[in-house]
Image (cartoon, grey):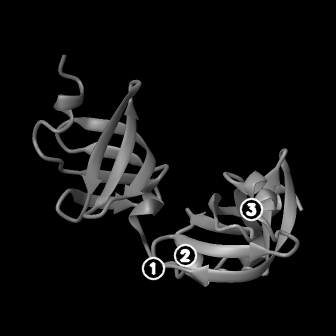
Amino acid sequence: MTIDQTFYIGYISKTRGLKGEVQLFFEFEDYMDLDFDVLFLEVNKKLVPYFVDTLKMHNNSTAYATFEDIDHIDKAQPLIKKKMYLPLDQKPERDPDDFRYTDLVGYIAIEEEEGELGEITQVQEMPQQFIATVDMDGTEVMFPLNENFIVGIDPEEQVVVLRLPEGLIDMYFEQ
């Protein structure tokens, strides 16, 4: 199995206890819909299969898992920070009408007054809202994404038009 035959779901964040249990951290939004018989971990730029023995899912993008043949903390320790992948055929299908703010990564952000801000490189979910990041001439500019600031989204052109609070962009460039 190669990386182009898989999709990234997260990484192993830490060990738990002495019996080889590890904490999984998911960066894949629909992690609750995934099947976890086998996880592929990236070890030395190769994918190595690990067979899941037990799995306890949590609502905070984490789970606790044990793997076959990993029965002690010393065997689990080398797995820390390893990226986790699943085969592409296990990726859940999303309804085409199920649009999410994270889908805006790669879109060009245009502010009505400021003009083109640049390509959205990242969308993070914060406790109260989603935050988009744009690289404007080497400066990382962040702004909230919500229905009050989004004027329109054009999926064909991959453009999002915004009306941001006055002075928000300027504050990134004040000396």
Residue 78, relative to residue 168: is it above or below?
below
Q: Amino acid at mark 2?
A: Asp
**As drawn, is 12 to the left or to the right of 136?**
right
Q: Residue farthest to the left? A: 166
- The quarter of the picture where the N terminus appears is bottom right
Q: Amino acid at mark 1?
A: Asp
> Of label 3 and label 1, which has the lower sequence position?
3
Q: Nearer the viewer, mark 3 or mark 1?
A: 3
Q: Position of residue 83 (x, y in %)?
A: 70, 55
Q: Residues within 10 Å of mark 3 (few under 14, many from 20)?
A: some
Image-quadrant location for residue 104 = bottom left
Circle 1: element type = loop
- Which dot marks residue 73? 3
Q: Amino acid at mark 3?
A: Ile
Task: Estimate the spatial distance between the alpha carbons at disc 3 and disc 1, rounded to whole Å.
Answer: 44 Å
Q: Which residue is mark 1?
A: 97
Circle 3: element type = helix
Task: Estimate the spatial distance between the alpha carbons at disc 2 and disc 3, rounded to whole Å.
Answer: 29 Å
**As drawn, is 30 to the left or to the right of 73?**
left
- Which dot marks residue 156? none
> Of label 2 and label 3, which has the lower sequence position?
2
Residue drawn at x 55%, y 75% is: 30
Q: Residues within 10 Å of mark 2 (few under 14, many from 20)?
A: few
Q: Residue farthest to the front? A: 18
Residue drawn at x 74%, y 71% is: 19
**As drawn, is 143 to the left or to the right of 23?**
left
Residue drawn at x 82%, y 50% is: 43
Q: Position of residue 79 (x, y in %)?
A: 75, 56
Q: Residue farthest to the top? A: 175
Image-quadrant location for residue 77 = bottom right
Residue 118, relative to residue 89: is it above or below?
above
Circle 2: element type = loop
